[in-house]
Structures are given as structure tokens and as C-alpha cells.
Image: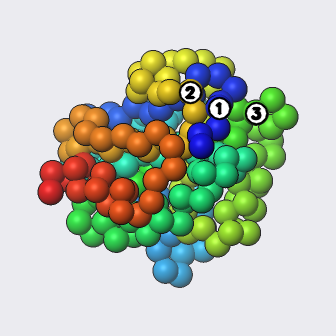
Amino acid sequence: MMLPLRSTALLVPILLGAACGSSADPSVEEPGAVERRVEVVSFDQLEQALGQDPGEGMLINFWAQWCGPCVAELPELIEVAEEWYPKGGRVHTINYDLMTPTSNVDGIVAEVNDFLDGRSLGLRSVLIYDEADYDRINEHYDLPGEIPVTLAFDKGGNLVDRVEGKAGKERFEEMMRKALGL
């Protein structure tokens, strides 16, 4: 079961024309890593952050801590991120917790960090979307208005697969193979 968003959900643009990719995978905590980056971003900042891995296949997962199916799939998504990183696969997560009327920007970073720590979820980087125009993302990525949603993009930035609703490790691996052209 997918949960509806306040607006018509959203997705993230992939810009593969950005600068060189970083040497560290920002989506998965490496052993011994102590810091996690949780950042509130606008649409343009989201595009910039996702464009830091040009020439890599990637999955982008949209989730929120209030979404049961989203939370249930995160551990297996993280496993796939860890396993496929050495092969050029990247996993990015976009958090929608600011889409609820009671959330606030001031406390959301601490709230998401506490949530991930409390469940021992090894996400190293979480982008929290905060922009009034959610329709912009929905239209750009043809999002259904409900989460979880996971999109797979190939090395050229083309959408090659999508899952609307909860997925598991096997399905995430299938998506990553498509993203990497394997």
C-alpha cells in the first residue's frame, strides 16, 4: 500500500552534465563513518546533488518516516547500495517529511537523524525536499503522488525502470542491473 502525499508527489531530476563525481558514496554509511549528512534542499539544489555522480547508474528512492512501506524497504535498499557501489551503482534517497502540514524546517534535520539512528539505518546522506512547488518535481519525473517510489536511471541519465510502492532487495538489484546495463 502506498501512502498519498500532501500534493502530487515528486521526483528528482538527474543532471548528468554536472561536474566530476565524488569519490565517496554519499548515500551509504561506510564502516567507521560517524557523520551523516541530512540536508534540506530546493528543486535546484536537489538537481545539483544528484548530478554529482555523472556516468553512474543510480536508483533514487522517495520516502518519509511516516510511510510504513517506505521504512520497511529501507534496510534492503541500503544493502543494495552497499553491494553495488563498487560496481558503479549509486543509491540516493529523497525524504518527504516536510510535506506534512505539521512539520517544520527548523527541527526536521534532527528528527530525521534521530529516526535513522533509532532504527540503525546506515544512510549517510538524506536530501529532504522543501519547496512549495511539488508539482514541478511530479511533472518532471511523472510521479504518481504516492510514496514509496524508486526510479532507476542508466549511465546516460535515462529512466530505465521504476517501482511505485514497496520493493525488496531482489527488485532493487534488478533495477540496479538495468541502471548499469548488466
Helix, strand or loop for disc 1: strand
Q: Which residue lies furthest to the bottom in this view?
A: 32
Q: How far apart are marks 2 and 1 (CA)?
A: 6 Å
Q: Which of marks 2 and 3 is in front?
A: 2
- Circle 2 crowding by C-alpha within 10 Å: few under 14, some 14–19, many from 20: many
Q: Is residue 95 visible to us here? A: no
| Mark nearer the viewer, 3 or 1 | 1
Q: Which amino acid does label 2 sit on?
A: Gly
The answer to which of 156 and 52 lies nearer the viewer is: 156
Q: In which quarter of the image is the C terminus?
A: bottom left
Quarter of the image for residue 174 reads bottom left
Residue labelled with disc 3: 100
160 is higher (above) or lower (below) than 6: below
The residue type indicated by label 1 comes to Pro
Tag 3–tag 1 contact (CB < 8 Å): no
- Residue 4, which numbered label? 1
Mark positioned earlier in the residue sequence (2 or 1): 1
